[in-house]
Image (cartoon, rainbow, N blue to C red):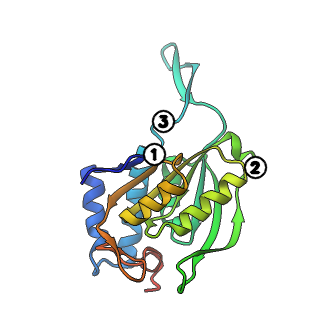
């Protein structure tokens, strides 16, 4: 399958292996949680590959040298509650100095539209690179609404990280936010009538927190 413009599928063997383990219905909550944390670290490695660097002079035990450091204000990770927190933990393992925001949204079971109930992001978000986190890009209604709010708060450089995406969700998100690139571990076949990704892995939040 040709990858749509603006989306990166991380096909690293470790990512694909861990994702396959997560898809299995018999995978326990504890194992699912560990795997999601591990994959999120690998996704973070990919999605932060274009962070700006600046040279500084340091002293090694042997001599001085000029070497690169991250430049500008610290990265912001924004979790779409509640399942986004599963990606957040692994990314913070890799970038512990990142600022963290949260967007609370739930999907109306009748309309499948996103309804906001919480919004809190760091200050000076317009000067910081922002990564929005949501494991499942299904209808993309929640992600679209979250990015709209984040843009309204002033963010200008935004990326989207997800574990799985549906073609319908990718199309809807790219139509709404063509300036926001997506990094994911896989694009699955389709959505079912209830807005779930097929073949997918079920409800990521339920499997993460043992509420299935």
Helix, strand or loop for disc 2: loop
Nearer-N-terminus badge (1/2):
1
Image position, residue 42 (x, y; %): 39, 50
User: Residue sitting at 37 percent across and 78 percent down?
Assistant: 202
The outermost residue toward the right is: 123
Is residue 24 visible in the rendered image? The answer is yes
Image position, residue 37 (x, y; %): 43, 61
Looking at the image, residue 132 sits to the left or right of residue 46; the answer is right
Whole-angstrom CA distance, mark 3 to mark 2, is 22 Å
User: Residue sitting at 53 percent across and 68 percent down?
Assistant: 141
Image position, residue 190 (x, y; %): 32, 70
Judging depth in this view, the residue of 173 and 94 nearest the camera is 173
Helix, strand or loop for disc 1: helix
Q: Which residue is mark 3?
A: 50
User: Residue sitting at 42 percent across and 83 percent down?
Assistant: 194
Q: Which residue is mark 2?
A: 123
Judging depth in this view, the residue of 142 and 37 nearest the camera is 142
At label 1, counting other C-alpha atoms closer than 10 Å, the crowd grade (few under 14, some 14-19, many 20 or more) is: some
Whole-angstrom CA distance, mark 1 to mark 2, is 22 Å
Q: How many marks?
A: 3
Q: Is residue 58 above or below residue 8?
A: above
Judging depth in this view, the residue of 94 and 5 nearest the camera is 5
Which image quarter is the N terminus in? bottom left
Q: Which residue is mark 1?
A: 47
């Amino acid at each position: 399958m040709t990858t749509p413009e603006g989306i990166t599928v991380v096909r690293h063997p470790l990512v694909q292996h861990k994702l396959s383990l997560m898809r299995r219905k018999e995978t326990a909550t504890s194992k699912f949680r560990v795997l999601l944390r591990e994959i999120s670290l690998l996704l973070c490695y990919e999605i932060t590959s274009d962070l700006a660097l600046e040279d500084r002079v340091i002293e090694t035990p042997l001599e001085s040298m000029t070497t690169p450091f991250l430049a500008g204000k610290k990265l912001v990770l924004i979790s779409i509650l509640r399942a986004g927190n599963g990606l957040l933990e692994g990314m913070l393992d890799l970038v512990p100095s990142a600022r963290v925001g949260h967007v609370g949204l739930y999907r109306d079971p009748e309309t499948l539209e996103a309804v906001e109930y919480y919004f809190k992001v760091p200050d000076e978000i317009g000067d910081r690179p922002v990564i929005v986190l949501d494991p499942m890009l299904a209808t993309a209604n929640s992600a679209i609404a979250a990015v709209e709010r984040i843009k309204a708060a002033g963010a200008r450089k935004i990326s989207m990280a997800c574990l799985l995406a549906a073609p319908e969700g990718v199309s809807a998100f790219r139509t709404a936010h063509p300036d926001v690139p997506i990094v994911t571990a896989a694009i699955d076949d389709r959505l079912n009538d209830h807005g779930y990704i097929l073949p997918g892995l079920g409800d990521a939040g339920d499997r993460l927190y043992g509420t299935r």
